[in-house]
Amino acid sequence: MGASLAALPLVGSVANAAQATGVRSGAAVGLDDPAKKEIAMRLVSSAENSSLDWKDQYRYIEDIDDGRGYTAGIIGFCSGTGDMLDLVELYADRSPGNILERYLPALREVNGGDSHEGLDPGYQDAWREAAKDSAFQKCQNDERDRVYFNPAVRRGKSDGLRALGQFAYYDAIVMHGDGDDGTSFGGIRERALAKAKPPAQGGNEVTYLNAFLDARVWAMKQEEAHSDTSRVDTAQRVFLQQGNLDLNPPLDWKVYGDSFHIG
């Protein structure tokens, strides 16, 4: 499972020391490097869809009974949280008259809850049909980057974090949203900052990331639908324990008991 992806491996005792102490390596690249971004997409897909084939998830849609209505697409856009509405509005702007446009009034009504009113029975089929359209796929990519990926990478870099830390931020924003309450990304980060300083503030990168992942696990356990913390415990925490702060393959991890590999 998985394919060989380009990487910039750390080598030698100097690199090992850099990983152990959180000192930035000159060879390090951010999560926005194309090869690293591909890894990030596959890691999230393993947790969200139990598959490394993230591009197969454009068509995904179901209600997972988490109070957010329909969850769909490559990043889990939700009818109850506004990001699905923003996505379908973007698609309507770029491709007027598309198959999802007729559902915009219903999406505006159900935003903020878990209702399917006005969406059933045809919305799921319409979503899957729209997912065949490259224009809709690009809309999903663009909204993923605007709402989730780019803010996570920007904040990770500002905190002095390398690719693994930037990914930890990204995965947290994907699941919890980019808010400031206690169980959103902002609250998780604040909880971590109360325990450790990030590298940009003179702290140790490993120590800080452990604090961030601890805070993330706490936030996940506040919600029954997210109480399985394996996407942290047997994935991100494994990479951190290995000192793989640059998220270099090969990568081996588990989510919900399923094993995954990127070579």
Image: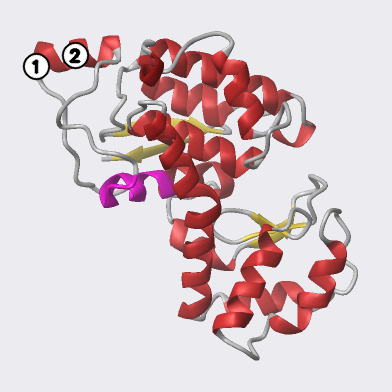
Q: Is residue 131 visible?
A: yes
Residue on which disc 1 sits: 12
Q: Quadrant of residue 180?
A: top right
Prevailing secondary structure class for the magenta stretch in the rendered image: helix
Q: Is residue 1 visible?
A: no
Q: Which mark is residue 16?
A: 2
Q: CA distance from mark 2 to mark 1?
A: 6 Å
Q: Position of residue 126 (x, y in %)?
A: 69, 79
Q: Secondary structure at mark 1?
A: helix
Left or right of 150 on screen, residue 24: left
* Identity, as a three-letter code, of the amino acid under mark 2: Asn
Looking at the picture, the colour scheme in use is secondary structure
Q: Is residue 129 above or below residue 80?
A: below
Q: Position of residue 154 (x, y in %)?
A: 42, 41
Which residue occupies 53% across, 22% down? 233
Q: Which mark is residue 246?
A: none
Q: Position of residue 201 (x, y in %)?
A: 40, 16
Compare residues 77 and 63 and report the one nearer the observer: 77
- Please tell me whether residue 65 belongs to the stretch shown in magenta: no
Q: Is residue 67 above or below residue 212?
A: below
Which residue occupies 40% across, 32% down? 158
- Please tell me whether residue 35 belongs to the stretch shown in magenta: yes
Which residue occupies 71% across, 66% down? 85
Q: Residue furthest front?
A: 201
- For the C terminus, the image quarter is top left
- The local crowd at label 1, few if under 14, some if 14 to 19, many if 20 or more residues have their Cα within 10 Å, is few
Q: Position of residue 135 (x, y in %)?
A: 49, 79
Query: Where are the magenta residues, as a range?
Result: 32-41
